[in-house]
């Protein structure tokens, strides 16, 4: 039997450990949102791909010594999307600022109470109309600050063009490819016949670009979903794209962002690519060491927009005001131009599009091309924005899978793959 | 306390009752505690595990069943009670059968070679090697590497057009294998990633069991003229029967839930455009976070998977128990 004093020691020790444990518990005290200005806070910002924010974050920290910013980067936008959905479902775990891609709005808008209202006079009229429209709720709340847009041009390998006897000068290439998709495919067929090198890398990119030029691809603005089996326009696009990719052999049969796709940049895998502003940084990274890339001020069908992001502040954040201030600063015209210089993310801010600073930007990797001017000109050519309702992404994914089966995997014919896509859409049980 | 009775004939000195130690009524706090200590404390010692298991094991199981009976959206939360409709819808989707097929195939391709390879490698490690500890630790290194890192490296090997394996095959004059398009090829690739990771772990389990085999059995066998291989099959393997049962059951439970490797096998993480390598856990993830965004259906798949794993586990157990003898020792020696 323990002695009396030993028992008391034991009790004291246990109490001590218990007190220590409570003391060590994380201080999850919720701080009030009203900033005192001198309080040291840490803001987290979650982005994906390359937003070009690295230096801007350092600059903001220097301007606001009490704020430390933690930058979380997801490798793909799909990852970031999954993470955001999980965080919203769980009610915690999101960063103070979450970057959102334009494709995610239809879902997020259904539960817009999850995002803070960011409307303010300071940012009134800052962005292009069609850019702000996507981030505004039906009752006029602004829930996202626009960052970049993705006006598309054509990036091409001038050395491969020279091999095929095609013009290599930017202006001449623009004249050559001016027109619609049929023109693009025709020139491509000629190129492939001469050199045997594929014209573009992925059939899905071509399909996606054409869908982005339609007004009501999968749903009507009135709110009804067009059943895929009755969607003649999409079916026609699907068949023509696959005909060009497989029968005419214009495609390099790669899946974008895959290991093979990244490797193909180094091995003359393809001659042209649809290039939104944010793709410039990606090409430069993957094609390091390859000379001959250039960019032409042209796009089949006139203009197109691919992607574009926003910064949102989730309602669950503990520092809504500071996060909103940071988001407003990051999306100001001057800062977005700096991000463009760093990673090619083209500004969506009206003042930026007109600034001399932007229009005089050139890109050394792309043969010194005036990328600022080219992308600004492409942005002006954008006429149509596709309507994206709640089912857009799901149906688009089903058709993309169908195209991958035929183009990349080559496991199906266009017809059988289309049947599988119809089944997949049916499984979703959409209304 | 022992009772003391006054010795007979010690005189009739009357002792005060209080001086005699009689059986104290067993109602004192101390006695109660003493009895409790003997009866109850074993249960208290094992209680923490069970409490924790109740919290993180049983409660999620019950809650998942609850979720599976409702219409539950990822962002929207709980909806109406729909009974077993989620189960019916899930089983009717063609992708359910595809997922089952893929899961079974990857499970067999990963578990069977793994167990065989692990026993052989363990037998080699059990022999009298130089730098034994180095080899034994080395075999565990692949297990320590993060699955993500393994997938990154293996995707360089298994890329369809630019991968190292296809390059070597091309140099040797064979056709390239379509690792990301062909169903069976993708299963082989994923199974090889799983085997890379888990063979070392299984080897060490077998090694530990082998070291418990009494050495004099080997001596006796050697004296009788058994070679290395004969000793392995006639002494080592029969003595390992309980361990083999254990390994097969844990391999079953783990192998039917493989998620990391197939998810990171390509950049999209869906299991291929035709779901060539989508496993049941990936199907669950697609139902919950993908286009359908239905936690109800995902929970239904989770419970179906649970039932399947328990069923297959029981089957495995019955089969291996039939083969194994109860004592684990070589039996059925015919007496002269």
Image: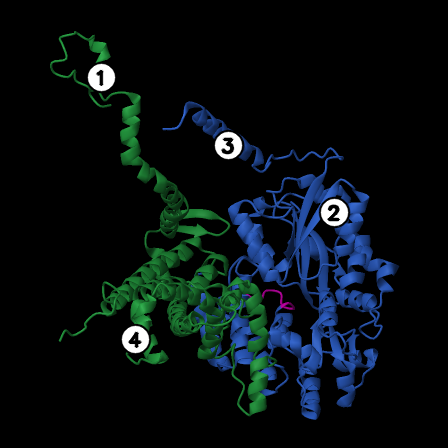
| Front position in the image: A31 or B97 | A31
> Chain B is which colour?
green
Q: Is residue A421 left or right of residue B237?
A: right
Could you tell me if residue A180 is visible in this image? no
Q: Tell me the number on the disc at residue B221.
A: 4
- Using the image, name the chain to which the residue with label 2 belongs: A
Give the color scheme: rainbow, by chain, secondary structure or one colour: by chain
Q: Measured from the top left, where is residue A429 in percent x and y? A: 43, 61
Image quadrant assignment for residue A103: bottom right
- Using the image, name the chain to which the residue with label 3 belongs: A
Could you tell me if residue A215 is visible in this image? yes
Q: Are marks 2 and 1 in contact (CB under 8 Å)?
A: no
Provide the residue designation for mark 2: A328
- Using the image, name the chain to which the residue with label 4 belongs: B
Q: Tell me the number on the disc at residue A18.
A: 3
Give the blue chain's letter: A
Q: Residue furthest front?
A: B10
Q: Residue furthest left?
A: B9
Q: Is residue B210 left or right of residue A252?
A: left
Image quadrant assignment for residue A130: bottom right
Provide the residue designation for mark 1: B21
Label 4 secondary element = helix
The label nearer to you, 3 versus 1, is 1
- The stretch of residues the image draws in magenta is A212-219
Q: Measured from the top left, where is residue B107 in percent x and y? A: 40, 70
């Amino acid at each position: 039997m323990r002695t009396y004093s030993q028992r008391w020691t034991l009790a004291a020790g246990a109490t001590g450990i218990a007190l220590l444990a409570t003391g060590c518990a994380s201080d999850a005290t919720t701080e009030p949102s009203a900033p005192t200005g001198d309080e040291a806070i840490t803001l987290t910002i979650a982005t994906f791909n390359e937003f070009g924010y690295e230096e801007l974050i350092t600059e903001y920290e220097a301007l606001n010594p009490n704020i430390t910013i933690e930058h979380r980067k997801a490798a793909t936008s799909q990852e970031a999307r999954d993470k955001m959905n999980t965080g919203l479902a769980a009610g915690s775990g999101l960063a103070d600022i979450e970057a959102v891609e334009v494709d995610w709005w239809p879902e997020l808008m259904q539960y817009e109470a999850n995002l803070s209202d960011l409307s303010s006079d300071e940012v009134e009229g800052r962005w292009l109309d069609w850019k702000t429209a996507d981030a505004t709720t039906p009752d006029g709340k602004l829930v996202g600050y626009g960052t970049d847009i993705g006006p598309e041009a054509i990036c091409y390998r001038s050395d491969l063009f020279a091999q095929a006897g095609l013009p290599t000068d930017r202006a001449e290439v623009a004249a050559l490819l001016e027109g619609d998709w049929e023109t693009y495919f025709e020139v491509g067929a000629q190129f492939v016949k001469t050199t045997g090198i594929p014209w573009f890398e992925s059939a899905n990119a071509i399909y996606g670009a054409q869908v982005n030029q339609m007004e009501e691809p999968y749903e009507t603005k009135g709110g009804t979903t067009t059943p895929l089996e009755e969607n003649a326009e999409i079916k026609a696009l699907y068949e023509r794209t696959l005909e060009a990719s497989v029968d005419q052999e214009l495609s390099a049969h790669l899946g974008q962002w895959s290991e093979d796709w990244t490797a193909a940049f180094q091995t003359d895998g393809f001659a042209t690519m649809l290039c939104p502003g944010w793709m410039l940084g990606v090409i430069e990274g993957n094609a390091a060491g390859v000379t001959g890339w250039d960019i032409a001020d042209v796009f089949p069908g006139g203009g197109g927009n691919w992607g574009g992001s926003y910064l949102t502040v989730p309602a669950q954040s503990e520092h809504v005001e500071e996060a909103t201030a940071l988001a407003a600063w990051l999306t100001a015209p001057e800062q977005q131009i700096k991000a463009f210089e760093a990673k090619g993310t083209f500004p969506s801010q009206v003042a930026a599009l007109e600034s001399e600073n932007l229009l005089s930007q050139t890109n050394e990797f792309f043969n010194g091309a005036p990328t600022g001017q080219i992308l600004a000109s492409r942005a002006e050519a954008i006429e149509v924005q596709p309507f994206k309702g709640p089912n857009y992404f799901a149906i688009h994914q089903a058709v993309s899978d169908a195209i991958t089966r035929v183009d990349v995997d080559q496991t199906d014919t266009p017809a059988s793959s289309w049947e599988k896509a119809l089944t997949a859409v049916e499984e979703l049980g959409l209304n | 306390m022992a009772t003391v009775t006054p010795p007979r004939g010690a005189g009739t000195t009357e002792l005060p009752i209080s001086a005699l130690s009689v059986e104290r009524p067993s109602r004192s706090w101390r006695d109660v505690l003493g009895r409790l200590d003997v009866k109850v404390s074993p249960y208290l010692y094992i209680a923490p595990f069970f409490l924790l298991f109740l919290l993180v094991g049983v409660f999620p199981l019950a809650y998942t069943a609850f979720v599976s009976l409702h219409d539950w959206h990822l962002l929207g939360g709980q909806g109406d009670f729909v009974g077993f409709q989620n189960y019916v819808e899930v089983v009717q989707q063609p992708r359910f059968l595809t997922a089952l097929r893929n899961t079974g195939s990857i499970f067999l391709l990963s578990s069977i070679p793994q167990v065989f390879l692990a026993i052989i490698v363990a037998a080699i490690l059990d022999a009298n090697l130089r730098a034994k500890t180095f080899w034994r630790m080395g075999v565990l290194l692949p297990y320590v590497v993060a699955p993500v890192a393994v997938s990154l490296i293996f995707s360089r090997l298994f890329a369809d057009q630019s991968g190292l394996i296809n390059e070597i095959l091309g140099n040797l004059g064979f056709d390239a294998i379509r690792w990301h398009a062909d169903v069976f090829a993708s299963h082989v690739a994923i199974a090889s990633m799983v085997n890379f990771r888990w063979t070392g772990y299984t080897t060490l389990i077998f090694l530990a069991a082998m070291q418990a085999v009494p050495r004099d059995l080997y001596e006796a066998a050697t004296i009788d003229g058994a070679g290395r291989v004969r000793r392995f099959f006639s002494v080592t393997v029969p003595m390992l029967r309980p361990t083999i049962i254990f390994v097969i059951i844990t391999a079953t439970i783990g192998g039917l839930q493989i998620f990391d490797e197939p998810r990171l096998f390509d950049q999209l993480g869906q299991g291929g455009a035709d779901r060539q390598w989508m496993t049941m856990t990936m199907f669950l993830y697609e139902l919950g976070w993908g286009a359908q965004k239905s936690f109800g259906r995902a929970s239904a798949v989770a419970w179906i998977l649970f039932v399947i794993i328990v069923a297959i586990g029981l089957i495995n157990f019955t089969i291996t128990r039939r083969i194994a003898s109860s004592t684990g020792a070589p039996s059925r020696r015919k007496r002269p």
